[in-house]
Image: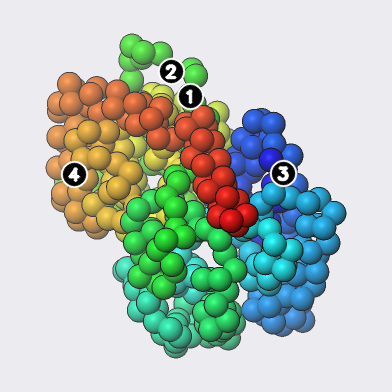
Amino acid sequence: MKLLILHNRYQLAGGEDKVMEAEKNLLEANGHDVLLLEENNLRIANLWQKFVVSGEAIYSVAAKRRVQTEIYRFRPDIVHVHNFFPLLSPSVYDACYIAGVPVVQTLHNYRLGCPKAMPFRDSKICEDCIGKLIPFPSVVHGCYRHSRIQSLVVASMTTLHKFRGTWHQRVDAYIALTQFQKDKMIQAGLPAAKIYVKPNFVDSNSNLEINHQRQKYLLFVGRLSEEKGMITLINCYIHNQLSIPLKVVGDGPLRQELQQQVIQAGYENLIEFLGYQDKLVVNQLMIDAQLLIFPSIWYEGFPVTIIEAFAASLPVVVPKLGSMAEIVEDKVNGLHYAAGKYQDLAEKINLAINQPELLAAMGRNARLAYEKKYSPAVNYQELMAIYQRVIAAKNS
């Protein structure tokens, strides 16, 4: 099978970029001919370019022509769009439609229902735009990049293509990462019959020993920003006097503030900030830890960190919220707590730490969940099934 992948990279590499690369490598490893056509936001360098791009984000004739050229040259069986915003734009769907090539879009975020792409505002979940024909609240609040003008551009893009029928008529299939996300995107107006659910995946952790003796510490891996809920975890320690060490991997805008809070509370010897670490170090930390704490306070798309933990037989504690509550099964491969409630989080941590048999069972189940749902082999079969259905439907 010949596949054309379209992707717009972010200025700061994110999860979507990594997932796209992993999927591309998986397809190539299974013998498929894959061509990647991509844009990069690094070329948006000055105000004039940003002004030009604001129009291109709504509809880029140049991107349409570029995709048409590649389609007629490469002759793909299917086009898979991972991210079109902002430089490729929804015009790429017209290029595929004109050429008669089926197109699949992975929904890495919630942008088609929320111009910010993250239904989160003023430190809480926000669904003011989801399901609205015109997402005007996002413009009023300047949700996208804290700018009313840029929010207007994104809102105009999603609205125009609703009226044009792009989302319903030009896209043959969408891939949602969880059932929760699928339900939200149906609420946002996408056609239910075209949305498939396929999770992300990670490579297996082949270094794990069956009888590995874990060290007594908890682990957090993620960006130190408000929506990731690290404030909840720090408060959990300070207000409940937890004594088990915590290792914090990651960086972000809240790092200095969080470290200062830890020092002021006298917990600097218990809570260790490790900053950014490469994949091998994170992998080893997961192998050695007793629990991964994932305290995000928004819905999330599909946190790869959780299934990386599963691959390492590491149970995960998550809030009972959004996609996280779907991926992690309570008292099976992890624990649920009330979102944002640090007292409940402390109770669940103590529950796991004080019941070694439960902790061990959740670790085994975490690995089983990985093997059953999130391995490359399983993911490849699911992806090919979607491709084949879409191609068959187009041919018919």
Structural crowding at the residue carrying mark 1, measured as other residues with C-alpha within 10 Å and reported as few (<14), some (14–19) or many (≥20)? some
- Secondary structure category for the residue under label 3: strand
In the rendered image, which residue does mark 3 sit on? Answer: 2
Q: Amino acid at mark 2?
A: Leu
Spatial separation of the CA atoms under disc 2 and disc 3: 36 Å
- Secondary structure category for the residue under label 2: loop
Give the label on residue 208, or none.
Answer: 2
Q: Is residue 43 left or right of 338 when viewed as pictured?
A: right
Q: Residue at x 19, y 22 (%)?
A: 356
- Secondary structure category for the residue under label 1: loop
Asked if marks 2 and 3 touch (Cβ < 8 Å), the reply is: no
Image location of residue 352, percent across then percent down: 19, 32
Instruction: Determine whether 70 is above or below 156 in the image.
Output: above
Asked if marks 1 and 2 touch (Cβ < 8 Å), the reply is: yes
| Quadrant of the snapshot with the C terminus | bottom right
Image location of residue 319, percent across then percent down: 26, 51
In the rendered image, which residue does mark 4 sit on? Answer: 346
Q: Is residue 4 visible?
A: yes
- Secondary structure category for the residue under label 4: helix
Structural crowding at the residue carrying mark 3, measured as other residues with C-alpha within 10 Å and reported as few (<14), some (14–19) or many (≥20)? some
Q: Nearer the viewer, mark 3 or mark 1?
A: 3
Spatial separation of the CA atoms under disc 3 and disc 4: 51 Å
Give the label on residue 205, or none.
Answer: 1
